[in-house]
Amino acid sequence: MGNLVLVIQEIQIEITTINDGIIIDLAPYLEMGYAPNYKKLLDENPDIAKQVTTDAGEVFAFACIGDASYKPSGVKVTFKPDPEIFEDTVFVYETLENRMREQAFLNAGVRIALIDARGEEIVENEFMYEGGIKSFVTHLNNNRHNELIHPEVIYMKGEKGTSVAEVALQYNDSYNELILSFANNMHTIEGGTHETGFKSAITKVLNDYARKSGILKDSDKNLSGEDVREGLCAIISVKLEDAQFESQTKAKLGNSEVRTLVEGIVNAKLSEYFEENPSVAKNILDKA
């Protein structure tokens, strides 16, 4: 998997991605004062990843100078906030730390190093989670210090076309729900179609199981969505090519096909999990 190193300097952030592949020589373009212009549309030129475009619109091909399979290679990006745009240009380490940890959870196996080089003592943290969003759920439940209803984090994954959805969940003994949803690694704080599909499916699966197992009788009303989500800690992460957000802040996902994808995954795989682990389903339903 890849690696990402983020270094906080006094007035800027340097981000370096390290991958296996070929070595690209950017020195000639940097000497000429050219910088990559990523606004060039990819669909206009399928080889754009091998090119650099100047602000004047001139296009030059990158020079491939060798095989990098024997050592790390990658791309370095420097970001310096413009004080005319940003009210505060001071980087807050804790904010970046939380964001990088979150990204490591969402991208299983990717190593992210965060280095604060502003003070006399360098502060460094490294994040990598092979368990991905399963580890994310474990981390959240550990931080809340709740007793778990079942020891194992339930994990589901599915895809349709180029879209991929992952869901991880675990119940604890609290009466609060914590559902975090993400689209292309962006936290959709207002939810969206992926979260709607998840909530609909988990309510249906638990009600269907309760009826089938006799926990709910014919005369009993169905459990509400709020009932089945008591004590639930869940992460929903979707990755798709044409993400449609309902605002510029990307707070809410609007792709209707994503609801169908997530709903289908949870309906099928959570039902199967409960059939294979009836004691887990019973413990969850007893709490609801």
Image (cartoon, rainbow, N blue to C red):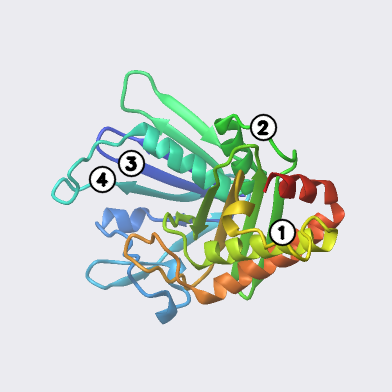
Going by the image, does 126 lie left or right of 155? left
Res. 21 mark: none
Residue type of the residue flagged with mark 2:
Glu
- The CA span between labels 1 and 2 is 21 Å
Q: What crowding class fits label 1: few (fewer than 14 Cα within 10 Å), some (14-19), or many (20 or more)?
A: many
Which residue is under mark 1?
Answer: 206
- The CA span between labels 3 and 4 is 6 Å
User: In the depicted view, which residue is nearer to us: 163 or 109?
Assistant: 163
Going by the image, does 154 lie left or right of 2? right
- The CA span between labels 4 and 2 is 44 Å
User: In the depicted view, which residue is nearer to us: 169 or 6?
Assistant: 169
Going by the image, does 90 lie left or right of 229? left
- The CA span between labels 1 and 4 is 50 Å
Q: Can residue 161 be seen in this view?
A: yes
Q: Looking at the picture, how far across and down is residue 201, in whole percent?
A: 65, 65
Quadrant hosting residue 157: bottom right
Which residue is under mark 2?
Answer: 147
Q: What crowding class fits label 2: few (fewer than 14 Cα within 10 Å), some (14-19), or many (20 or more)?
A: some
Which residue is under mark 3?
Answer: 13
Going by the image, does 41 lie left or right of 204? left
Q: Looking at the picture, how far across and down is residue 57, in whole percent?
A: 26, 73
Residue at figure coordinates x 35%, y 28% from the top left: 117
Q: In this view, does 118 lie above or below 101?
A: above
Q: Looking at the picture, how far across and down is residue 187, in whole percent?
A: 45, 53
Circle 3 SS class: strand
User: In the depicted view, which residue is nearer to us: 132 or 225?
Assistant: 225
